[in-house]
Amino acid sequence: MKISETDLRLGFWRLHGDTLFPETALIADTSKQNFSIYPRKYYVDALRSCRRCHRPFIFFAKEQRYWFETLRFFVDADCVHCPDCRRESRTVQRRLRRYSDLFAKNEPSRKELMFLVDDGTYLLAHGVLKNLSNLGSVKNRAMKDISEYPGIACLAEAIKAARHVQSEA
């Protein structure tokens, strides 16, 4: 079924400024949508620019259908990050949750301590962790219990670099 670009734009208010690919349009099942006033009549591939990395990406019609009919996201929700940045954000959240849980443990296992070191290094590099004394305590605990683990050197180097940046600020 061919739907005109005008009808697609009239079918959902947020599409007014997007580059659309009308040949990809799918008719929406509004009975499965979560909306307060206006449902989405159609889903259509739309060209977007990622808010984080500014690269262009396509928010695919099939992906929109999944978001709004299966996951039941509110229909005014918008995809503002590219797939790579969304994946990275989920990774950061998952590692931060694990880091927090493991940091609170009194007696982490060797494997858990390795995760703690690696997650601390990763999260520091991504600007999520700022408390260098907490990271230093992770490094010291790891040096005591798993001194042979190479990840400790990476964490130590990351802490050193972060301290240098802080001292210059």
Image (cartoon, grey):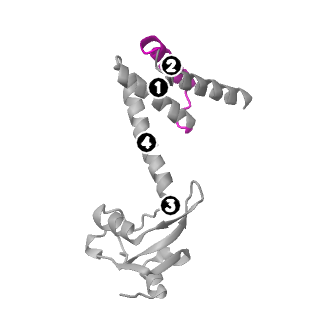
For discs 2 and 3, the disc positioned in front in the rendered view? 2
Q: Residues within 10 Å of mark 2 (few under 14, many from 20)?
A: many
Question: Is the magenta region chiefly helix, strand or loop?
Answer: helix
Q: Distance between the residues labelled 2 and 4?
A: 21 Å
Above or below, comparing residue 100 to residue 66 in the picture: above
**Extreme top residue here?**
144
The one nearer the camera, 110 or 9, is: 110
Report the disc number at residue 80. Answer: 3
Residues at badges 2 and 3 in contact (C-beta under 8 Å)? no
Give the secondary structure at mark 3.
loop
Q: Earlier in the sequence, mark 4 or mark 1?
A: 4
Q: Distance between the residues labelled 2 and 1?
A: 7 Å
Q: Determine which residue is flagged by label 4.
A: 93
Q: Determine which residue is flagged by label 2.
A: 139
Magenta region: 126-147
Image x and y of residue 61, in percent:
40, 72
Q: Earlier in the sequence, mark 2 or mark 1?
A: 1
Give the secondary structure at mark 1.
helix
Q: Which amino acid is tagged 1? A: Val
Q: Distance between the residues labelled 4 and 1?
A: 16 Å
Above or below, comparing residue 17 to residue 85 in the picture: below
